[in-house]
Amino acid sequence: MSDPSSPPVSPPISLHREAVLAWLETQVSPQRLAHILGVEATAKALAPLHGLDPEAAATAGLLHDLAKFFPPARLLAIAQAEGIPLDPVLEQVPHLLHAEISAVVARQEFHVHDPVILNAIRHHTLGCPGMAPLSCLIFVADAIEPQRGDDPALLALRRASRKNLYKAVRKTCDLVFEHLLAHHKTIHPRLIETRNWALQWEKYGEK
């Protein structure tokens, strides 16, 4: 089994946060913007606990849902233009592409080129086996930011997120599965693969 760790994130990019916020205000609902800011703050707070750059984490958190409200046809069109592979589940549920497309928008609209940050945006919905620690962090922060609530399962997940990123990824997948199964929703195979990968690495991530 190979070590999923990645090279250190490059120095923080020059990102005009106010310009991003102004763009988001025209593209997402106030409730979604509150969620995005919650992910930004959560990621920035967690990053030092895992030896990650807080500014890179905040940047990925701020940009993670740029395409959240893009209509299905637009998501599919951008995916095809960018050569993003489509499978039957993504074609059936194009909304799952919003993470991939948010990375495209971050690159095109805000000139983000750091591959570690772009991958963290890209992987925040379905994850990816072997994903870098920053991707794990954003995947988890998306699930635990304050707007998500304070039920016992979330509180347990927040505790895990401070000690073991891989355990937190696995527990995040488990919570997502519960929600999808309860609502008779399709589960993308990559989320299952991400869960199984994180389970294997859990024992190495304890702090």
Image (cartoon, grey):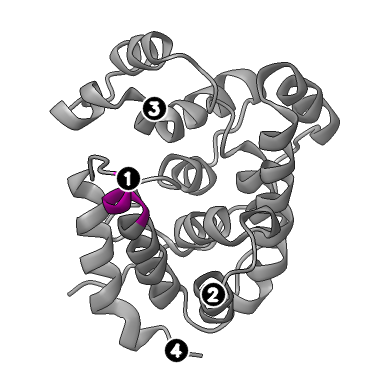
Eye-nearest disc, 3 or 2: 3
Q: Would residue 182 be counted in the magenta stretch? A: yes
Marks 1 and 2, Cα distance to the nearest angstrom?
26 Å
Helix, strand or loop at disc 4? Answer: loop
Q: Which element carries disc 3, helix, strand or loop? A: helix
Magenta span of residues: 179-183
In this rendering, the label closer to the viewer, 4 or 2: 2
Q: Earlier in the sequence, mark 1 or mark 2?
A: 2
In percent of width and height, residue 58 lies at 69, 51
Dots 1 and 2: beta carbons under 8 Å?
no
* Residue to which mark 4 is pinned: 206
Query: Badge 3 is on which residue?
Result: 95
Q: Say what amino acid the circle numbered 3 marks.
A: His
Can residue 114 be found in the magenta stretch? no
**Disc nearer the start of the sequence (3/4):** 3
Mark 1 secondary-structure assignment: loop
| Residue 126 drawn above or below residue 176 | above
What is the x, y in percent for residue 183? 32, 45
Q: State which mark lies toward you, 1 or 2.
A: 1
The numbered mark, 4 or 2, whose residue comes first in the sequence reads 2
| Secondary structure, magenta segment, majority class | helix
Residues under labels 3 and 1: Cα distance? 16 Å
The residues tagged by marks 4 and 2 sit, at their Cα atoms, a distance apart of: 10 Å
Report how far apart the C-alphas of labels 3 and 2 lie in the structure: 26 Å
Proximity of marks 4 and 2: CB atoms separated by less than 8 Å: no
